[in-house]
């Protein structure tokens, strides 16, 4: 299992060297976007709308927009220094609470913790203490350039870090539209609803829940592949140097014609009054 973070978890004077591993994985079926005509994958480029040119990664800087089109530029060195300052700190458990005190809306992502070298005994100590007290630890830690609020708990004999949202990241329920304040419920209807809930109540067995859409989509893809209903992207045409040279020469010739100054026309001599009189006679 890939190690995505190494550090130290501490509570009181106990320090536990640990490694962190992603506990979940996204199994969404990723679909590519192709050009309908030639079946080539669509390419997305970073472009500057003002300069009208493609931008390379080394030409991009990070910034915070504090007002419309007003930015504070942040150097990569400054961001790395802030990140390292936080990462070098031990992850300290500051509080212990009961799991049921935290509403599920706060939970974000799960990570497994394994003991690093020499951390097995302290790891086991924290695991046993959490199990016996029925508590979870609250801590702060840096994960992927963001300071996360997290809980540390036991899941099937393994310590788990659950990142949770900060209170200001959870939107207020007062902002949800059209929520009825009071609804008059008929007792018979309520009793029937409660009876239905009781009949459908069961132990949570995650294995029985399947992603039926993903399974059906994979089946459809496999069926089309077996029936040779496939498409192959065309190779990008390789530029022909000879053709390019002729095109460049032709373009240069056309430009030279446009830029070449037109020859000056000789000025027509204006007849004098005496010449006009002589011509008339």
Image (spheres, rainbow, N blue to C red):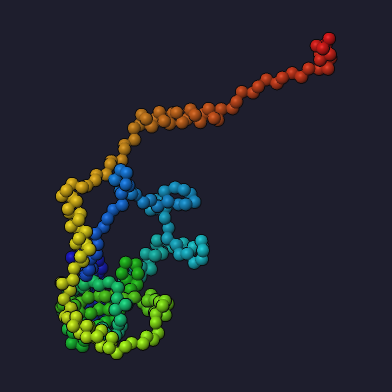
| Depth order, front residue of 43/191 | 191
Q: Quadrant of the C terminus?
A: top right
| Depth order, front residue of 87/266 | 266
Residue 42 position in % (x across, y down) = 33, 49
The answer to whether residue 53 is visible is yes
Q: Is residue 128 above or below residue 219?
A: below
At x 16%, y 80%, the residue is 203
Quarter of the image for residue 275 reads top right
The answer to whether residue 129 is visible is no
Q: Is residue 156 left or right of residue 38?
A: left
At x 20%, y 65%, the residue is 212
Residue 49 position in % (x across, y down) = 47, 52
Q: Is residue 158 left or right of residue 162?
A: left
At x 70%, y 21%, the residue is 267
Quarter of the image for residue 206 reads bottom left
Q: Quadrant of the N terminus?
A: bottom left
Residue 141 position in % (x across, y down) = 31, 74
At x 17%, y 81%, the residue is 202
Q: Residue furthest bottom?
A: 187
């Amino acid at each position: 299992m890939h190690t995505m973070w190494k550090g130290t978890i501490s509570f009181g004077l106990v320090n536990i060297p640990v490694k962190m591993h992603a506990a979940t994985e996204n199994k969404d079926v990723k679909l590519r976007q192709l050009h309908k005509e030639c079946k080539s994958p669509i390419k997305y480029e970073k472009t500057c709308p003002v300069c009208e040119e493609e931008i390379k990664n080394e030409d991009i800087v990070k910034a915070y927009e504090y007002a419309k089109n007003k930015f504070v530029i942040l150097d990569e060195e400054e961001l790395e220094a802030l990140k390292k300052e936080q990462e070098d700190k031990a992850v300290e458990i500051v509080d212990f609470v009961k799991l049921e005190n935290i509403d599920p809306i706060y939970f974000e992502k799960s990570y497994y913790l394994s003991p690093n070298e020499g951390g097995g005994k302290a790891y086991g100590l924290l695991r046993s203490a959490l199990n016996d007290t029925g508590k979870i630890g609250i801590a702060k830690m840096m994960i992927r350039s963001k300071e996360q609020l997290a809980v540390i708990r036991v899941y099937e004999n393994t310590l788990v870090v659950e990142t949770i949202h900060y209170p200001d990241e959870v939107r207020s329920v007062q902002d949800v539209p059209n929520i009825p304040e009071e609804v008059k419920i008929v007792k018979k209807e309520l009793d029937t609803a409660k009876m239905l809930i009781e009949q459908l109540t069961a132990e949570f067995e995650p294995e029985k829940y399947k992603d039926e859409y993903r399974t059906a989509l994979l089946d459809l893809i496999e069926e089309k592949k077996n029936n040779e209903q496939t498409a192959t992207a065309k190779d990008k045409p390789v530029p022909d140097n000879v053709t390019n040279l002729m095109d460049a020469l032709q373009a240069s010739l056309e430009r030279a014609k446009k830029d070449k100054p037109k020859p000056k026309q000789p000025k027509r001599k204006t007849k004098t009054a005496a010449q006009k009189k002589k011509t008339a006679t």
